[in-house]
Amino acid sequence: MDRGVRCEVCGHPVRSAGEGLRVCAHCYAVTEEGIGPWTYEPPSRRWERAEMPEPEPHHAYGFVNSTLCGLTGDDIVASPYPWIPERPAACPSCRTAAAVIDARWPAEKRLPRRIRSAADIENGAPPF
Ligand SMILES: [Zn+2]
Ligand SMILES: [Zn+2]
């Protein structure tokens, strides 16, 4: 945890995840140093499926060696597959957690970040 560093999405303290990345334990936003928060993704596209000793239910992978619903263990790692909350095999607690985390994103932070083009600047478009 870096003292005093706050999440640009929800304002909660964030912790360093190494390599210039910070993650927020509240809204799970990932912020890249010098660039800003990664673009918002809806719950159905956002999570990787956790690779676990038991194949079902499908848990969503959260932070280091943990699932969204709070299971932890050295044998919990991210799989190369997306976690699809609509699948019947999806863990209901992970589904709930994903919905709660999603609700912590203010509407204005869900928009993709706009990049001004040279033409916009020439036309005097407002900088946002
Ligand atoms: Zn946050
Ligand atoms: Zn779960």
Image (tube, helix red, strand yellow):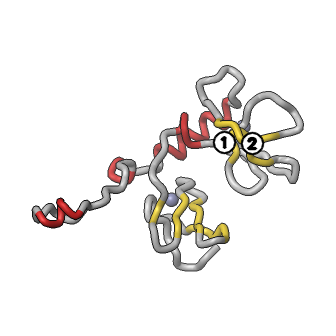
Give amino acid for label 2: Ser
Residue drawn 55% across the image and 59% down it = 30
Question: Is 37 placed above or below 110 here?
Answer: below
Foreground residue, 108 or 11?
A: 108
Asked whether mark 2 and ligand 2 are closer than 8 Å, the reply comes as no
Measured as percent of width and height from the top left, residue 71 is found at 78, 46
Q: Which quadrant of the figure contains the C terminus?
A: bottom left
Residue drawn 74% across the image and 46% down it = 78
Reading the image, the residue beneath label 1 is 48
Measured as percent of width and height from the top left, residue 37 is found at 47, 61
Q: Dot 2: few (<14), some (14–19), or many (≥20) neighbours within 10 Å?
A: some
Which numbered circle lies on residue 32? Answer: none
Quarter of the rendering containing residue 90:
top right
Q: Dot 1: few (<14), some (14–19), or many (≥20) neighbours within 10 Å?
A: many
Q: CA distance from mark 1 to mark 2?
A: 6 Å
Residues at discs 1 and 2 in contact (Cβ within 8 Å): yes
Reading the image, the residue beneath label 2 is 79
Question: Is 99 placed above or below 33 here?
Answer: above
Measured as percent of width and height from the top left, residue 14 is found at 57, 67
Foreground residue, 56 or 33?
A: 33
Question: Is 53 placed above or below 120 here?
Answer: above
Foreground residue, 59 or 18?
A: 18
Query: Horizontal placement of 67 versus 2: left or right?
Result: right
Residue drawn 68% across the image and 45% down it = 68
Residue drawn 73% across the image and 32% down it = 58
Q: Secondary structure at mark 1?
A: strand
Query: Horizontal placement of 120 versus 108: left or right?
Result: left
Query: Horizontal placement of 93 versus 103: left or right?
Result: right
Sequence-wise, which precedes: disc 1 or disc 2? 1
